Image: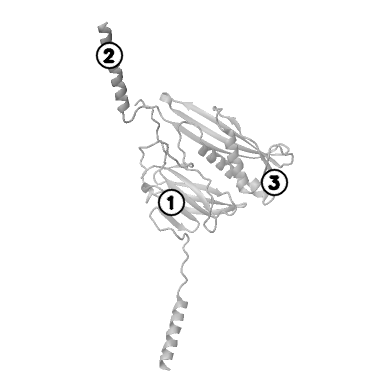
Amino acid sequence: MRNKLILVFLMAQVLLLSGCQTPPTVAEHPGYISKSNLDDSDPRARLVLGSKALVGNIRMANLAFRKVGQFTQAQVGIQNLSNDRYNIEYRVEWEDANGFMVDQSGVWRRLTLSPTQIDTIMSTGKKPEAEKIVINLRLPDDPFIINQDKK
Amino acid sequence: MMHFFKQTKVVFLLLAASFFIVGCQSNPQGQQSDVAMVDPKSRGHLQAQLTMADYVALAETVTNKMLVSKLVQKWGKKRPKVIAAVPVNNTDNENVRMRDLHDRIQETLFGSGVMRVVDKSATDFDYVIKSELTSTRQYGKGGKQLVYYTLQLKMFTLMGELVGQWSDDLAMAKSQKKMF
């Protein structure tokens, strides 16, 4: 009888403890390993730095989203934290709420950032289901310029 | 006679030697260079002329501006019928592929789903989108060039009234020719 009571008590404790557990937080971008060149701090935006030289020197800030008719428009601030002048290129892609790519039509575009400058990138997801933005940044990659620093 | 044969022999030997040397070259002139696949979305240029990626960039930006305009927002889910005319080439280069630029604009308009794209032969439509590509070019010493391309998109009603105009610029600079 005493053993049964202990057993019931233990089972109740287990149930109680499991009930108290906070539900596991759902990763906003499951499957990606956190790296210094990947900024996924915002659930609707992901910044991927494609050049080592940009890590720690370029960051995204002041994200804003708005509905424009059927589409979503995003505005992302790109901040140069360093005292160097950066000639960079960026490409924007759009994902739907489930993380499926819905707009990959963007080409690489050039952007020049003076020391400590903040510039703004604006993009519109040209599909009504476009929800999240992926910004790829890198130092210009030109197949005919072989002597530039691509690190 | 003997002297003639001796000279011919020397010439023959020199020719044979030169053929031998050319044949032994590990990297003779005229050999085909390697070809690499490149990212079609990259913006590499060999000349100060537009590439396919530039057409996409220009078409994307102007159509983006159009799609988020107050005019298009007012349409809601009406989906009016639109004719997208082939852009007019007003650049200094007759070889710009205007048909490709037109296809890129039309693809973006069609993909957006906010309008119905009809052929230019259609008799029932609501708007006509006319576009124009212009350029200015400056030449400097040693082959330096500075080129600006502008793509303009204009939307007209059936009555010919201009109801919207959007544009985008693209600038290219070509550096000085290197001597060595």
Amino acid beneath label 2: Lys
Name the image quarter holding the N terminus of chain B: top left
The residue beneath circle 3 is B80
Using the image, determine if residue A88 lies above or below residue B180: below
Using the image, determine if residue B174 lies above or below residue A4: above
Residue at horizontal 45%, vertical 48%? A136
User: Which of marks 2 and 3 precedes in the sequence?
Assistant: 2
* Horizontal relation, residue A83 to residue A46: left or right: left
Query: Chain under label 3?
Result: B
Residue at horizontal 41%, vertical 38%? A143
Name the image quarter holding the C terminus of chain B: top left
**Residue A54: horizontal and vertical position, in percent?**
38, 48
| CA distance separating discs 1 and 2 | 71 Å
Q: Say which of marks 1 and 2 sits in front.
A: 2
**Same chain for the residues under marks 3 and 1 in the image:** no
Q: Residues within 10 Å of mark 3 (few under 14, many from 20)?
A: some
